Image: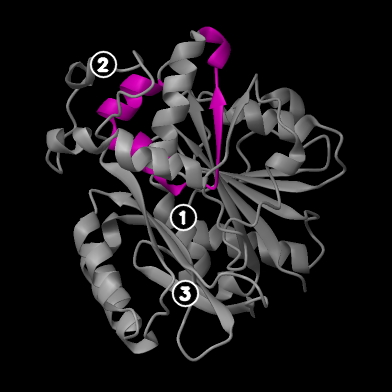
Amino acid sequence: MALIPATILTGFLGSGKTTLLKRVLSEAHGQKIAIIENEFGEENIDNDILVADTNEQIIQMSNGCICCTIREDLRTTLRDLAEKKRKGELDFERVVIETTGLADPGPVAQTFFMDDEIAEQYLLDSILTLVDAKHAANQLNDRQEARRQVGFADQIFISKSELVAKEEVDALIHRLKHMNPRAPQRTVHFGDVKISEVFDLRGFNLNAKLDIDPDFLKEDDHDHRHDHDHEHGEHCDHPSHAHEHAGHGHHHHHDDDVKSFVFRSEKPFDPAKLEDFLGAIVNVYGPRMLRYKGVLHMKGTERKVIFQGVHQLMGSDLGPKWEGGEQRLSKMVFIGLDLPKDIFLQGLEQCLAA
């Protein structure tokens, strides 16, 4: 049986997850979607698109989609859904998991890799994060959950941008780009997004392109160097007054604990050294490593090596061959909480073949 694609939808409280879900469910795209909600809160899927009352764990919707709450473990819910699909009791093509506004998407993503039974039935497609433009500055300053959700994202949707000035939206876009340069950003109005921007994004596909805007990173290197003198400690969860410059100018960069950095080298890696080093840093820093991904030039192979990870889980695969005239370049991006950039970059440098 073909693997069932799964999407994780996250975002801080009130960011518009349910609005976006309703939009996806009510659009005439002909897809049958199973929605798993971590909880039916006050903002649950409206009863007008539900057929049954919400006492049942699995609810059929008027458009053929289904909705279920997690009363137990996510693994159990996913297994039950897959079994019902196999038996022909439920008809759906894909799954969307809506996390609570305070959730860390990491453990949800890990479920798809750690549990063999789930891994044999589902394919994790991407993590989508909604950011509320009106309240984002304070939420990102004050709440680590909000920052982590940005760090995990494969695609960021900015909601409520019509409620704030353009300069504030620009400052937010710039800030999010610093935290997670690999996630494209889109502003959305009342959940109005194309299905093609929600599904089949292949964020966890090892052969997906590693898209990072190179000019952004160049500009980042010299324009913001002075900011690094003012970094707060690891446990900085100060309220917003610590960041009074928020939103006032494009180049006032926030010292968020979620940061990203990139390693590049034209020299090939020594496979044994790199494996040892990555194993060691994942062992020490894994809980703080949100997402990391790379295309590697390895000594001894004519093919690209693609790797990626979430927290302590890391995987790699042989990709396509390097083309004839293509520059053989290793490129890795790390997104995490207060990761020691110098240790990572120096360590990677020492893994290069002599």
Residue matched to label 2:
245
- Image quarter for residue 117? bottom right
Q: Nearer the viewer, mark 1 or mark 3?
A: 3
Q: Mark 2 belongs to which amino acid? A: His
Instruction: Specify the segment rendered in magenta.
Output: 136-163
| SS class, disc 1 | helix
Q: CA distance from mark 3 to mark 2?
A: 40 Å
Q: CA distance from mark 1 to mark 2?
A: 34 Å
| SS class, disc 2 | loop
Residue matched to label 3:
315
Q: Nearer the viewer, mark 1 or mark 2?
A: 2
User: Is residue 36 shown above or below 63?
Assistant: below
Q: Mark 1 belongs to which amino acid? A: Val
Q: Nearer the viewer, residue 233 or 7?
A: 233
Q: Residue furthest front?
A: 325
Placement of the N terminus among the 4 image quadrants: bottom right
User: Is residue 326 shown above or below 76?
Assistant: below
Q: Earlier in the sequence, mark 1 or mark 2?
A: 1
- Horizontal relation, residue 262 to residue 241: left or right: right
Placement of the C terminus among the 4 image quadrants: bottom left
Checking the image for residue 108, the label placed there is: 1
| Residue displayed at 48% across by 20% down | 170
Q: CA distance from mark 1 to mark 3?
A: 17 Å
Q: Mark 3 belongs to which amino acid? A: Gly
